[in-house]
Image (spheres, coloured by chain):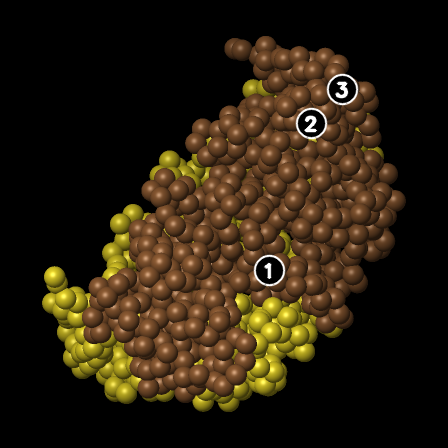
Chain colours: A brown, B yellow
Amino acid sequence: MSAIVNSDVIERKMGQNSIIQPLLTDLYQITMAYAYWKSGKIECQAVFDLFFRKSPFCGEFTIFAGLEECLKFIEKFSYSESDIEYIRQILPKTIEDEFFQYLGTLTAKDISVYAINEGTVVFPRVPLLRIEGPLIVAQLLETTLLTLVNYASLMATNAARYRMAAGNLKLFEFGLRRAQGPDGGLSASKYAYIGGFDGTSNVLAGKLFNIPVKGTHAHAYITSFNSIGELNHHFISAKGGGEPQNFLKMSLTWREKIYDIFNVVLSEVNDGELAAFISFAVAFPDGFMALIDTYDVKKSGLVNFCAVALALNDLGYRALGVRLDSGDLAYLSLVARDYFKKIAVKYDVPHFAELMVMASNDINEETILSLNDQGHSIDSFGIGTHLVTCQKQPALGCVYKMVEINQHPRIKLSHDVEKVTIPGKKNAYRLYSETGFALIDLLQRSVEEPPKINEKVLCRHPFQESKRAFVIPSRVESLLNLYWHNGVITQPLPNLQQIRENVMNCLKILRPDIKRTLNPTPYKVSVSDTLYQFLHRLWLENAPIGELS
Amino acid sequence: MSAIVNSDVIERKMGQNSIIQPLLTDLYQITMAYAYWKSGKIECQAVFDLFFRKSPFCGEFTIFAGLEECLKFIEKFSYSESDIEYIRQILPKTIEDEFFQYLGTLTAKDISVYAINEGTVVFPRVPLLRIEGPLIVAQLLETTLLTLVNYASLMATNAARYRMAAGNLKLFEFGLRRAQGPDGGLSASKYAYIGGFDGTSNVLAGKLFNIPVKGTHAHAYITSFNSIGELNHHFISAKGGGEPQNFLKMSLTWREKIYDIFNVVLSEVNDGELAAFISFAVAFPDGFMALIDTYDVKKSGLVNFCAVALALNDLGYRALGVRLDSGDLAYLSLVARDYFKKIAVKYDVPHFAELMVMASNDINEETILSLNDQGHSIDSFGIGTHLVTCQKQPALGCVYKMVEINQHPRIKLSHDVEKVTIPGKKNAYRLYSETGFALIDLLQRSVEEPPKINEKVLCRHPFQESKRAFVIPSRVESLLNLYWHNGVITQPLPNLQQIRENVMNCLKILRPDIKRTLNPTPYKVSVSDTLYQFLHRLWLENAPIGELS
């Protein structure tokens, strides 16, 4: 399946992105812009960090995603005439006209963006984006950047957790109907794929992002057939060609033969279901996959499926497998596998033992882990609601904080120590052990020399004085790369497949105890001694001295 | 604020909707379409019901929303050439070419849509949409309709619950940055407004949907000022006009005067914060609202705010109020109110007693109810994450089930009685008591006469034989209205304000015990005796008879 790039697709892609525009923001960004402008801060230069404070889903890692969309937004950042006309309407009449003229000239060409590569595993307090440039523009970017990073990263992280739970089994995203809006559904398909899913049911996502698309039929298809008499077309030629054969008769003959294996009687096996399966096999003889739980999996669905699959086999076709959408999935998958193996032996059709069993009813990360514990014979999962809405934690709390203005550091204090920001322009490094695992992330002031391979570096907890460690890295990775400068994107952007590979590779450099579901070990994020001193000096300078009375 | 309708806005609106297109669906809808087509079911006529099985958020009511978007989707339903080219690529090579030609001709003009009015309060199992027409087209609409109804209704319901909790206080949606994708954010703003919010921070939502937009400044604005020396412009003229006055000096003078009231000393009050407030007041002298928790609410934020507000008062302006974004909101709001009242009396500025206190930190429905219990002096809430992601339950489980095909009823059986569908084409009525409260919803077969005012009607529980009641309605409302027929929208569609009023009016006709947060009483949804008999006859006919051995 190759990407289609023609004008219609491009037009629709742009359509999809057309709400990602400067007005997709909170009004206070614009009122602040006016107040900054009015107080003469046009020339002010600022540095903002975009980061989060806690990994989602009670986990200890996050996948950073959404960078490409951020850069595309920054690239075309400018207010249209109608935008400015609208802003003029909603702001007080006292706003000076020159401000609107000023807004009309704004672009992001004087902004520089340093970012972590998309698809990288990231940790609390490390800047995912460092935005430098004119205060007013940098501030105006805040809300949209947060919107673009928050859900993308949450979704990619969620998908990566499902991927780890599922091991090598296939995972498909089936969540469009339950997503938070049509674009929520599209983003879910895209970032689930990045996080490690194998495909989606969402056709538009397939078309726009070149993601594999998957699907068979719904219960409605099965119930739309009430009897064998409703079958209008039931002839197929063998795979090699030749006269069309009476496929209904072949299927009925097989069904008679296998009643014994399933220990069922005629009245228990639904004929509408058989008619539906036959019609679907006639349409897709080489891709026959059947939903088998509309009536009764053991007494009807499996029997009808096997009859049709055996008839297909006689004509040289191979059925794909079955889908279970209700009931005890572990048990039913084992039952199905057991019958498939019996038939494989009895009728000498070895591929029957390997037929796919897909499960798709209300699956979440815990369900997969619990199925693993119980033992099952499922090959692939179709996952909807829990995946796309991130039910366990539906928002990632990324924030965007000013850390420097006109080369003066800024700190945001808080009674809650976890919310104190780390001031100043910073670089971020990942230090690796000899075994290839990531040991620690280290934040430094941007004026410091990067840590060196095989040289001892002191890594300090940002807030707890006594927590310190010397680290001798075998490899040092600089995390923040320049992605936008002088009005252009300065790096080639990876495609979805490459980002997806980055996710898979990053997860390998994390120790298993950091990735586990239950009580994972926190990964350490540290500051250099210089940054520690700098942070705490500023903290003291800015905290008021109270008086007890 | 009036709606702007010019070509740019229209173009962007269309851009926003451009992902709502036939490919925004699950692939299995298209594979089913081919299998139906291949088995000669082009002429089949079907009826589908779109409904949900349980109200969200542990509640007993739901607000139906998303209808206008469904109708707009149906109106322009058709596959483009590039859509068909893409489908051809992802389906097996054996698909007949005539099918793609057939797809290219499809529209929804032979479909009829009956729907409940948007913004109506609705209950489990009552069809929100009844879709009639060619089986293949009706089936192809499924996923997109579910996507458009599910999140819209969930969000409107969530907002209505916040509205009930907040009584007459103002509610603003501030969730864009934490929403599930940019369009999730836009939908949240729109449906929060429908559900009873007073406005949003989302500027694009304001522009596209004509919703009031609200916003002041962020902590970054405050921390961008470090000292009074940074104030470049600090002169304002009085409201009536005249020479610009030294507003810094006026504010400092007031601050000196009021230190005593607040029992603070100079070193505790932050000068950067004062500078930020002054610059903001200079920009918005008639709309001054201050975020007062950057440093210390009691010892700095309130003191600086009151100084600036009193100086504004001297010039004939009235400050709006303060926003609290951290700490104990109930307590701090009472403290603020107390100081405002003291100042109102001491300096004879009565409007000070009425200054607005807005709260905006991680608010959810329970927070509001708990604040109400504790006592507070908050006038308005800004609500983000919990509202827009519907954290308590991030998906509504609407389903789309075939209930009739070629005038034969269809039933979907399940081991779980709650999942058995109510077969056949149905109408839905709401029966009202003399007092104006809704008593019960009643589903009937479409061939039955509607219930009549002041005539006894037997209402039965759909599944529990002994649960029956006679009802004598004082008013009967037919819930399903024809909205789409012969290729046109057949009713004038209400605007957002009208839908919002419908929500408010509908909530009034619900008894308080149905709306309460804790252990609400379920509202009854019943079937007529005729439908009850019909349902149970079909059930028996379709359920296989097992054999015990």
Numbered circle sitting on residue A430: 2
Q: What residue do we see at 68% from left, 33% from top?
A: A127
Distance between the alpha carbons at the discs numbered 3 and 2: 11 Å
Sequence-wise first label, 1 or 2: 1
Distance between the alpha carbons at the discs numbered 1 and 3: 41 Å
Which one is in front, A529 or B368? A529
SS at badge 1: loop
Q: What residue do we see at 56% from left, 56% from top?
A: A199
SS at badge 3: loop
The chain carrying label 2 is: A
**Labels 1 and 3 touching (C-beta < 8 A):** no
Looking at the rendered structure, the kind of residue marked 1 is Pro
Sequence-wise first label, 1 or 3: 1
Mark 3 and mark 2 on one chain: yes
Q: What residue do we see at 49% from left, 38% from top?
A: A57
Q: Is residue A7 visible?
A: yes
- Is residue A216 shown above or below A232? above
Looking at the rendered structure, the kind of residue marked 3 is Ile
- Is residue B138 shown above or below A32? below
- Is residue B360 shown above or below B230? below
**Labels 1 and 2 touching (C-beta < 8 A):** no
Which one is in front, A402 or A155? A155
Q: Is residue B377 left or right of residue B233?
A: left
Q: Is residue B221 left or right of residue A515?
A: right
- Is residue A358 shown above or below B92? above
Q: Could you say where residue B404 lies in the image, as x and y percent from the top left?
A: 34, 81
Q: Could you say where residue B466 lies in the image, as x and y percent from the top left?
A: 11, 67
Q: From the image, tell me which residue sits under label 3.
A: A453
Location of the C terminus of chain B (image quadrant): bottom left
10 Å neighbourhood of mark 1: few (<14), some, or many (≥20)?
some
SS at badge 2: strand
Q: From the image, tell me which residue sits under label 1.
A: A212
